[in-house]
Image (cartoon, helix red, strand yellow):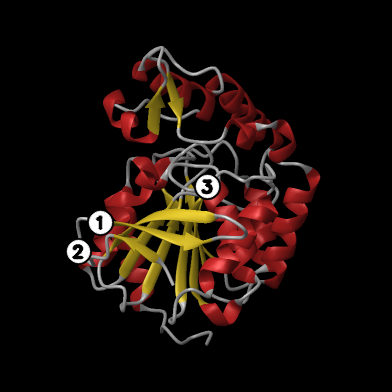
């Protein structure tokens, strides 16, 4: 069971701690812990704040929304063995599933989406729905190269938040965030005043970013998953391909694909509340015990 800090089911959000695979994961919880759980997972280099708006919205609708920091990110533990391969993130998801008494809805973007597919597909009886934000097997290699550059540049930190916003827009090929000051909640300043993302620098090592084993794990998960799966594909994504999505649908015939128009890969930062509204509509059509 989670360790609340403190224990309050209020919509303002409560810091909670859950057990991952050999480490502790931090999250912000919204709503009643007895309600159906909806767990949110951010992309690499982000933090639990990326999904805060969505978690609050689902809580207002009667769900228990928790937005998590992935291992090595935000307030979650860094991996003592520096294991940031996809399977390690997936094992954390597996541990979380058994800390809830009701079937869990998993929502993930980018790395968080990959982890939910890998971990959730291994325990279909524990999962109500997997919702993926711009994640599928067989993603573009050149898009992964952009992510590698982003992580490498980020390791040096940024002189200003505007510099960080520029890096996001350039390397992830998305519209620049209008108010760079909003990035402060996902960053920290060192004693010299430079800004760094809230993640273990080791998470950006090349050996953890799309090695061959990663796509093999995603393909296996796509073939294995039996619960409902929805893929929200960003119209301007630099990572997904038509063929990759088509292959995903062949492996997982139950997959539903919808398009988020006018946005790029990390679109949840800008469309959190609208994303939550769609999620609530989909949940209304999926019985909680569908896979129990």
Residue 283 in the image: state x and y as whole percent.
37, 73
- Residue 86 in the image: above or below residue 29: above
Of tags 3 and 2, the one toward the viewer is 3
C-beta proximity under 8 Å, tags 1 and 3: no
Residue nearer the viewer, 264 or 164: 164
Residue plotted at (62% across, 64% down): 119
How much space separates mark 1 and mark 2, taking CA atoms? Answer: 6 Å
- Say if mark 1 contacts mark 2, CB within 8 Å: yes
Rendered image quadrant of residue 194:
top left
The residue where tag 1 is placed is: 13
Earlier sequence position, callout 1 versus callout 3? 1
Q: Secondary structure at mark 1?
A: loop
Vertical position of residue 149 compared to residue 40: above or below: above
Residue at 53% in and 23% down:
154
Residue 10 image label: 2
Secondary element type, mark 3: loop
Residue under label 3, please give it. 77
On the image, the x and y values in percent for residue 180 come to: 31, 24
Q: Disc 1 versus disc 3: distance between alpha carbons? A: 20 Å
> Closer to the observer: label 1 or label 3?
3
């Amino acid at each position: 069971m989670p360790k609340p800090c403190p224990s309050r089911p209020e919509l303002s959000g409560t810091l909670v701690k859950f057990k991952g695979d050999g480490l502790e994961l931090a999250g912000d919880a919204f709503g009643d812990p007895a309600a159906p759980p909806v767990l949110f997972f951010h992309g690499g280099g982000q933090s639990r704040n990326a999904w805060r708006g969505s978690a609050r919205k689902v809580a207002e609708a009667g769900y228990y929304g928790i937005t998590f920091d992935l291992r090595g990110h935000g307030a979650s533990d860094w991996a003592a063995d520096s294991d940031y391969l996809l399977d390690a993130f997936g094992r954390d998801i597996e541990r979380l599933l058994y800390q809830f008494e009701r079937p869990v809805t998993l929502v993930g973007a980018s790395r968080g989406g990959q982890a939910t597919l890998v971990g959730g597909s291994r325990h279909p009886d524990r999962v109500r729905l997997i919702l993926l934000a711009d994640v599928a097997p067989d993603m573009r290699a050149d898009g992964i190269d952009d992510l590698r550059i982003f992580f490498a540049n980020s390791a040096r930190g940024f002189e200003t938040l505007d510099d960080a916003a520029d890096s996001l827009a350039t390397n992830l090929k998305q519209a620049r965030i209008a108010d760079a000051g909003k990035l402060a909640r996902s960053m920290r300043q060192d004693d010299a005043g430079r800004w760094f993302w809230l993640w273990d620098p080791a998470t950006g090592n090349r050996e953890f970013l799309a090695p061959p084993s990663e796509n093999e794990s995603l393909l296996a998960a796509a073939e294995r998953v039996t619960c409902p799966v929805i893929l929200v594909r960003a119209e301007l994504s630099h990572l997904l391909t038509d063929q990759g999505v088509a292959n995903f649908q062949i492996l997982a015939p139950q997959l539903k694909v919808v398009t988020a128009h006018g946005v790029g890969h990390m679109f949840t930062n800008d469309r959190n509340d609208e994303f939550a509204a769609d999620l609530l509509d989909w949940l209304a059509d999926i019985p909680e015990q569908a896979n129990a």
